[in-house]
Amino acid sequence: MVVIGLLVVRQHAGIVKTLPTMSRINAETRNLESMATDLQVMQKQNQEWNAEFAALQELAQPFWVFGTQRAIVEQEVTKEFGKILRAAQVVPQKVESQRNKLPSFNHVVEVEIRLDLRGVSMQEVSRLFQEVEKSRRKLIWSYCKIEPDNPRTPTSVNVSARLKAFALSQESADFLLGENSELPARAAGKGKTL
């Protein structure tokens, strides 16, 4: 009988340890309060990170995006700049573009556009400035020289200018702008139209 009594006590001793005593309830309450405080700190941290990330996304919006082939971005920037020139109703003497690697940035490429206009009016130059400013992709003026076509009897102006466009790699664009940062034309295999 004693053996059976010991077996019964041994089997139910585990249940006694899990009974809701006041000390166990207080310990669990403290543990839950601590976890709730940790959760509030993490939620606040998450909100701060989301705000920082939203600011990064906003900064990334005007940048161009290049895929796996960096050379294509140069063509895309030149094509878009051609649209800007047509919208401004300006016929350039010469337009050249050059892709430059930025030494300390692996996910950003710079495309420089060189532009020469000869014998244009200031109204045409003004329209060009407005169209560049209206462009949904960021173009930064790095150099602009406007001079009269003839110093003694000017009738029009000559313009030499350089603009820079910065492009994000597809990987960084996916991270900053979301997984669908490719434009529809590219997804269809026709190249990206900007």
Image (spheres, rainbow, N blue to C red):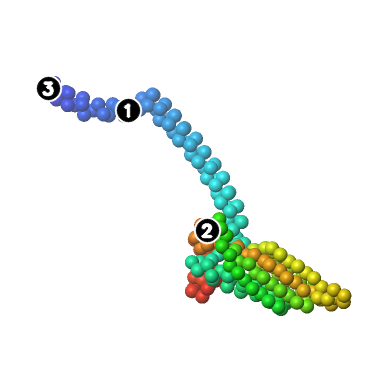
Q: Nearer the viewer, mark 2 or mark 1?
A: 2
Which residue bears the numbered disc 2? 106
Task: Please indicate, yes or no, whether residue 188 appears anywhere in the rendered image.
Answer: yes
CB within 8 Å, label 3 to label 1: no
Is 6 placed above or below 110 here? above
Q: Single out the residue that lies furthest toward the right.
A: 152
Q: Where is residue 84 in the image (x, y as percent from the top left)?
A: 67, 72
Which residue bears the numbered disc 3? 1
SS of the residue under disc 2:
loop
User: In which quadrant is the C terminus drawn?
Assistant: bottom right
Q: Mark 2 belongs to which amino acid? A: Asn
Q: Where is residue 85 in the image (x, y as percent from the top left)?
A: 69, 74
Q: Mark 3 belongs to which amino acid? A: Met
Give the CA separation, mark 3 to mark 2.
80 Å
Is 124 placed above or below 13 here? below
Give the CA separation, mark 3 to mark 1.
27 Å
Which residue bears the numbered disc 1? 19
Kindly identify the residue that appears in the image at 50 percent across and 41 percent down: 42
CB within 8 Å, label 2 to label 1: no
Task: Please indicate, yes or no, whether residue 64 appears anywhere in the rendered image.
Answer: no
Kindly identify the residue that appears in the image at 42 percent across and 26 percent down: 26
Closer to the chain start, of discs 3 and 1, is 3
Kindly identify the residue that appears in the image at 44 percent across and 33 percent down: 32
Quarter of image, res 75 = bottom right
Q: Mark 1 belongs to which amino acid? A: Leu
